[in-house]
Image: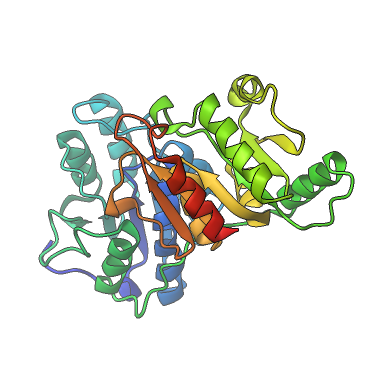
Amino acid sequence: MKSIPNVRFLKNILILRGEGSLGDALISSCCYREIKRTNPKIKISVACFGSAYEYLKELPYIDKVYRLPIPRVLRPNQRWLTLLWYALKLRRKHFDLVLDTSLKPFANWTLFKHIIGGDKVLDYYTSPIPFGQVPGRCVDHEQAVLAQLGVVKPNKSYEIPLQPAKLAKRDAFLKQHIADYKGNGYILLNPFGSIAARSLDKMNIHRILKELAARTHLPAIIPCMPSQKARAQAYLQGVRQGVLLYETDSVFDLFALVAGAKVVITPDTAVVHIASGLRKPTVAFYNSYSIVNDPDNLLARIIHTAPASVNLFEFSAFETALAGLL
């Protein structure tokens, strides 16, 4: 690409998301709002996959969301035929710009982009000038890319849509299970990450709940998807009263739960970023800490764990972080 276009003069753009996680989608959510603010008539399409799809298709600034034929993680040298077929399908839309803010150099992903957009692809590798802010936090990189596209003083805050039905469901649950609940809030403990190495085990869940019982009278809520419910119930055997399981059926249940929490405790980066968007005090466990995924939240305290597992950490560091937030 010879020059970076200004979004004020574009009519139809496609933004590619090579990350399928909810956390990455939250970080990028400022893009659509800020582009639409600069050019209200522009049509914004997004191609994504994984848990990002459910979230992004509900954002009001996006006109069309395409689900890419990719599982949870985009890998090099896979899905060649399905990506080729989908690229040919998207090519017929004749986008003015195909934007990819990721730094993925995979050959299958590169071919996919250029079949869709040809010389209208703008990414780290085709930009005529240094693209965005690399390295650095993802949220700052997204903001820098927006500035290059002509978005004046872009706001990097996340979009966290709170659905009234999900808020009502949360409140009804609390009133049903806590007899004297007066809306004072609760501690949200989300122990499950995307894989076992990023999930808290039974021993640490019990240690954390014991510490909470010693420091606060607020109830503890543990969210779980239906597939996690049996494991969560087994983990909570013998635990004190005042700890409740909340079954979630969508990411919007998580948004509602985080919105009502006094403190969020989790090893899951998606929940860390939800809490960041809602400016919630957070204790986060990172076993593979990277400045790229650093939460944009002054109220977040990060516990650095062993690379092999989030369960290997100094418990005194957690006690200190929790005491400071409570």
Q: How is the image coloured?
A: rainbow
- Of residues 265 and 240, which is closer to you in this image? 240
Residue lying furthest bottom: 152
Question: In terms of image quadrants, where is residue 90?
Answer: top left
Q: Position of residue 175 (x, y in %)?
A: 85, 46
Q: Residue sitting at 12 percent across and 53 percent down?
A: 125
Q: Is residue 177 left or right of residue 220?
A: right
User: Seen from this angle, which residue lies furthest right?
Assistant: 179
Q: Nearer the viewer, residue 130 or 315?
A: 315
Q: Is residue 106 above or below residue 37?
A: above
Whole-percent x and y of residue 93?
A: 35, 49
Identify the residue shown where x is 40% and y is 35%: 310
Relative side of 42 to 147, left or right: right
Q: In this picture, is 151 found above or below 51?
A: below
Q: Residue at x 60, y 57 (%)?
A: 161
Asked whether, in this view, residue 103 is left or right of residue 58, the answer is left
Asked whether residue 281 appears in the rendered view, the answer is no
The location of residue 204, given as percent across then percent down, is 52, 32
In this rendering, is residue 3 above or below 105? below
Q: Nearer the viewer, residue 199 or 9?
A: 199
* On-image quarter of the N terminus: bottom left
Tell me the quadrant of the picture where the C terminus can be found.
bottom right
Residue at the location (17% across, 37% down)? 106
Where residue 10 appears, x then y in whole percent?
32, 69
Do we see residue 188 in this rendering? yes
Q: Report the number of discs.
A: 0
